[in-house]
Image (cartoon, helix red, strand yellow):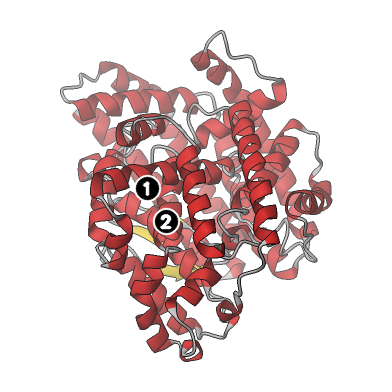
Amino acid sequence: MDALRQHLARIQDLRHAAAVLEWDQETHMPSGGAEGRAHQVATLRQVAHETFASDATASLIESASPETEVDADLVRIARRDLARATRLPAPLVGALAEASARAKTAWAEARQDSDWALFGPHLERIVDLTTQKADLLRPLIAEERGAGYAPSDADARYDALLDEYEPGASTTEIAAVFADLRSHLVPLVQDIAARGAVDDEPLYRYVPETIQWELGMEIAYAFGYDLERGRQDLSAHPFTTTFGIDDVRITTRVDPNFFPTALYGTLHEAGHALYEQGISKELARTPLADGTSLGIHESQSRLWENQVGRSRAFWRRHFPAFQSQIGSWMDLNADTVWRACNRVQPSLIRVEADEVTYHLHVLLRFTLERELIAGRLAVGDVPDAWNAGMETLLGIVPETDRDGCLQDIHWSLGALGYFPTYSLGTLMSGQLWDAMGRDLGDLDALVADGEYGAILGWLRENVHQWGRRKTATQILQDATGSGLDAGPWLAYIRDKVESVYG
């Protein structure tokens, strides 16, 4: 076991070193460094993969004799990861890392210029490499899921990608979840529209970037984000990255003319960071020291962003401090801003979408990804397909690619199969919030009193500490008493809509 731990720790160090370079690329690297950085990241990722997908790793796993439950979980997860790693040749892993490093720079330039043509060739390369990856993993997924597993070829390929982010999930199950959500949310949006709009003008008042930054960081710190083990920087798209349990960093972006961009970007990423900082330290430098699934990870970011940060109790507690620093808010009150932050209206940008229409944004991306991976949608046709989907699902069409198909960074990262986890995580956040209320009592009272430690403590015990030792289903079952269930979130959102719109 000691030899296996030392071997896996070296591999984790290589992966974290690559993550440092990737973080720097998004935050501080000069644009001229893109080509060299692509080679550096590719080298580290490929060496880490070669070291892990080796006979030495297999031998250590087979010869290890677990003496504790943590040891047994480590061997189990290492064996699972090795089964996937050995299906992927190192040159393919390196090519994907290099293509992604180049694509991220191209995406940032394309987004700035609102020019899909600058990014398209890079996405074509990523789709090609990702498809190769999926086809290599498909037989393993089929073997693990048994004789009853019989998806179409296209869905089998997407399942292989989805499994990387949400182990065990299937395309058909995800499609059914979205169909159910759509059946509830579209009529709800129509009902809300009939009741009249909520005034969100206060959110568009000018607030200096430095003030927005400081307010967001004050709240993240109040939530429990440890700034001795983390920091925040600016990036084109907010993200969280970890170089180990004691170094978890977040980014945000700031729009001086739209207050929610920075605040909720910070709160969302702080939720991710709280998860990573809360993993048990005995799992450090092992494959167990990570989120068990992207759905569970998103449940944490969405819970702190929405159930806490968009609650009436939150705004009543923090509004006086906000108002004292924002001169243009002197004529407002807490409830006015709370209602503005919860206005339901179809909008262009996913990360700034209201809670009701958010799932429709994710559904669009899921639909387009399935078509890309199946080969039924050409990369060059993505902008038109995007705009058509926006019109069908949300009734609006972006005027520019910057506000449309270029708004998210994920495809440049090679993260096809990732987007559905945003909706899964949102549903999980509803389940966890509901269960937390049963255990802790009046959660609004805790928020109103700034007692975030009680909320964080419950999450530490039931979610964070476990890392990958428990699956997403096990965490939900143990914490809430059931598997994935949309019911609690739908009840939560209906209650909020009633409160906001009357």
Q: Secondary structure at mark 2?
A: helix
Amino acid type at circle 1 is Trp
Q: Is residue 425 visible?
A: no
The residue nearer to you, when weighing 237 against 134, is 237
Instruction: Give the residue displayed 70% in from the left and 60% down from the top.
Output: 194
The residue nearer to you, when weighing 452 against 192, is 192
Q: Which mark is residue 307?
A: 2
- For the image shown, how many numbered marks are present on the structure? 2
Crowding around mark 1 (Cα neighbors within 10 Å: few <14, some 14 to 19, many 20+) is: many
Q: Position of residue 323 (x, y in %)?
A: 41, 85
Please, which residue is most extreme toward the front here?
502
Q: Position of residue 281 (x, y in %)?
A: 22, 45
Amino acid type at circle 2 is Gln
Instruction: Give the residue displayed 47% in from the left and 34% down from the top.
Output: 485
Instruction: Give the residue displayed 26% in from the left and 29% down from the top.
Output: 4
Q: Position of residue 129 (x, y in %)?
A: 66, 37
The residue nearer to you, when weighing 156 against 113, is 156
Q: Position of residue 145 (x, y in %)?
A: 51, 16
The residue pinned by badge 1 equals 433
Q: Secondary structure at mark 1?
A: helix
Q: Are marks 2 and 1 in contact (CB under 8 Å)?
A: yes
| Disc 2 from disc 1: Cα separation | 8 Å
